[in-house]
Image (cartoon, rainbow, N blue to C red):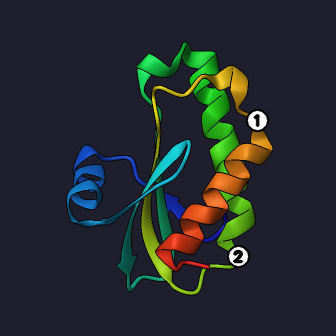
């Protein structure tokens, strides 16, 4: 994530969730706004209903690692929010399924 800053403030998330384009995948929801800055901005949200802290952090690590692989292929700079769907059972998901889902979402959004 060398060309990416993180979204930390609640108002930043709200701005993207209300004004951004939304794309739905099997495990994720992607909200995107194009930006004219020199860095991407990424926010990741996983609901407490998904599981305990260990499970939520595992999902966040998987999302960040997959994002790192796609980041170098982005044509423009974006503000991105990735939301994990809370009704997904973590036992049925692995790193590669998330990667395929994220790739299809970025292609739908026209980012890669």
Q: At numbered mark 2, what does the secondary structure look like: helix, strand or loop?
A: loop
Position in image of residue 75 (x %, y %): 58, 86
- Where is residue 61, by image quadrant? top right
Give the spatial CA distance, label 2 vs label 1: 23 Å
Please state which of the two labelled residues, at mark 2 or mark 1, is closer to the viewer. 1
Q: What residue is drawn where x is 70% and y is 32%?
A: 93
Q: At numbered mark 1, what does the secondary structure look like: helix, strand or loop?
A: loop
Along the line of sight, the residue nearer the viewer: 55 or 22:
22
The first of marks 2 and 1 along the sequence is 2
Q: How many numbered badges does the structure rendering display?
A: 2
Label 1 packing within 10 angstroms: few (<14), some (14-19), many (20+): few
Question: Is the C terminus in the top left, top right, bottom left or bottom right quadrant?
Answer: bottom right
Label disc, if present, on residue 94 of the rendered structure: 1
Q: Is residue 14 above or below residue 16?
A: above
Q: Is residue 95 left or right of residue 109?
A: right
Q: Is residue 59 above or below residue 75?
A: above
Q: What residue is drawn where x is 54% and y is 28%?
A: 88
Residue that sits furthest to the top in the current view: 52
Q: Is residue 103 left or right of residue 22?
A: right
Q: Is residue 51 above or below residue 70?
A: above
Q: Which residue is mark 2?
A: 72
- Where is residue 15, by image quadrant? bottom left
Position in image of residue 110 (x %, y %): 52, 80
Position in image of residue 96 (x %, y %): 79, 46
Q: What residue is drawn where x is 75% and y is 63%?
A: 69
Q: What residue is drawn where x is 63% and y is 46%?
A: 63
């Amino acid at each position: 994530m060398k060309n990416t800053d993180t979204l930390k403030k609640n108002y930043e998330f709200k701005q993207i969730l209300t004004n951004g384009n939304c794309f739905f995948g099997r495990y994720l929801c992607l909200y995107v706004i194009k930006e004219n800055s020199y860095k991407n901005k990424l926010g990741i949200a996983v609901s407490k209903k998904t599981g305990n802290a260990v499970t939520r952090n595992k999902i966040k690590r998987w999302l960040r690692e997959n994002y790192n692989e796609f980041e170098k292929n982005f044509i423009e700079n974006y503000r991105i929010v990735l939301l994990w769907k809370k009704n997904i059972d973590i036992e049925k998901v692995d790193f590669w399924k998330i990667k395929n889902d994220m790739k299809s979402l970025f292609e739908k959004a026209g980012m890669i």
